[in-house]
Each structure stands twice: as structure tokens, then as C-alpha cells.
Amino acid sequence: MTVQVNAPAPVYARPVAVVIGPTGPSGGPTGPTGNTGATGAGNFTGNTGPTGPIGTGPTGNTGPTGPRGQTGFTGPSNPGPTGNTGPTGLQGSQGTQGNTGPTGSTGNTGSTGPNGGPTGPTGPTGLQGNTGPTGPAQTLGIEVVIDGQGSAITTGLKSWIEVPFNCTITQAELLADQTGSVVVNIWKTTYANYAPGTHPVAADKITSSTPPTISSAAKAQDSTLSGWTTTVNAGDILAFNVDSAATIQKVTLSLHVQRS
């Protein structure tokens, strides 16, 4: 019987039969040995059992670290003494300084040239010319446009301007966009007195009873200016008021003035 053990696997055993044939008869002292019987046919080996797992035992704990040995003593540091400083060597003697060469002489300064001739006397001042005659007075235009924007002009205060120079009014002219009637009055005040609603107002008019007027026409011109206050000083404010109007939608008032 063959037995194979693989611990810790189970053990399997299978019997093996061995048959041996009979031995032949013994002969005489010199007789031949009988033939050996044939081996039985039942001689076979059983199957090998399976290999069991290889068991691995757990790793044991690491032992504690042993104590650290003491640090050895540091050896003494005893430098040898510093040697003495050797004596300073003698300084060599200074050589003699060479002689300075002579300084060269300065050249002579050249003579100054003669000055120019004397300055001549200043000539007498010429006579002043005669003053020319005064030119004619400068004529300018002061214009204001009153526009009804496509409708007949309405009454009331329309515009005001400052006159920046002294002048005298010599003529008034009205030009309308169509035949009709309009009366434009002119009021005047100073810059210091200017205050809307107080000055200029109707009481400040300069046109007396003959303001610029178109009557059933498209234009009008007045150079007589009867009763007008025609003097205008620099800084005066002129205001333009429509006293009445009919049909005319746009009109230009032009004041001819002579600047003084």
C-alpha cells in the first residue's frame, strides 16, 4: 500500500494487491531451479491526492530599539601659542630730487588798436505833420427779426439786445414777408437798471408817438424820427415790443446808426 500525506489535506489510501507465483520443487543437490512465476496483473499505484495550501504564519512584532549609547567626550583644543612678530625692516633712504628747470619768459602784449571815429551829433527832430481831417461818421445797422413761425405775428415783447458802442439813430426801416400791418415800439434802459418786468417797459420808449409802422403794405421807412430819443450810449439795452399786427408773419426792423 502506497500512502502520500500532504498536511493538512485529507489522506487517501488505496490497497495494492501483489500476487507471487509458486516456487518450483527443489531438486536434488544439483537439480535446476524452477522458473519464477509471473507477476500478478493487479500491481498498480493509486492516484495522488491534491496538494494542500501552503500556510504562512503571521510576522512577529518588531522588537524595541535599544537605548542610544553615550556621546564620547570632545577632545581638548589647545592651539599652540602665536609666535612673536618679527621686527620691521629699515626704510631705505629717499633719493635726491632733481633740479626744476627755468620758467620761460612771457611774451610782450600787443598794442591796442585805435578807437573808431567820434560819434556825430544827433540831428534835430523833424516838424510834426498836420492832423488830417476827421473822416465821416461810421454808419452801422442794428437789426432784429420778429418771426411768427408760420402764423401772424402776435403782440408783446419779442426781443432785446445790448448796444456796445455810442451811436445816434438816424433812420428806422421795416421789411415784412407779405402785405399787412404792424407797429413795433422800441424801449431803452441802462444795463444797471435792466430788470425784466421793471425795465425796460412801455414807459421807457424812445419813439414818442411815431414808432416804426407798416400800414397795409410790406415795407416802411422813417428818417425824420419825430420826437425820438435818438442817442444811445455804450451798454444801453434796446427792447422791441409789437404793439399791433395783422397778416404779417415775419418782419425785420433795421435801425441805421452813426457810431461816435
Image: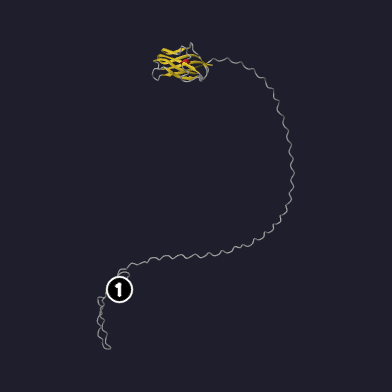
Q: Which residue matches tag 1?
A: 3
- Which picture quadrant has residue 82? bottom right
Q: How many marks?
A: 1
Of residues 80 and 99, the one drawn nearer to the viewer in this rendering: 80
Residue 11, percent from left and from top: 29, 71
Residue 93, percent from left and from top: 73, 53
Q: Residues within 10 Å of mark 1 (few under 14, many from 20)?
A: few
Identity of the residue drawn at 30% across and 73% down: 3
The residue positioned farthest toward the bottom in the image shown? 29
**Up-down relation of residue 224 to residue 115 (above or below):** above
Horizontally, residue 7 falls left or right of residue 22, namely right
State the quadrant of the C terminus.
top right
Of residues 210 and 91, the one drawn nearer to the viewer in this rendering: 210
Of residues 175 and 98, the one drawn nearer to the viewer in this rendering: 175
**Up-down relation of residue 95 to residue 22 (above or below):** above
The kind of residue on which mark 1 rests is Val
State the quadrant of the N terminus.
bottom left
**Up-down relation of residue 255 to residue 58 (above or below):** above
**SS state under label 1:** strand
Residue 197, percent from left and from top: 46, 19
The colour scheme used to paint the residues is secondary structure
The residue positioned farthest toward the front in the image shown? 198
- Which picture quadrant has residue 4? bottom left
Residue 241, percent from left and from top: 44, 17
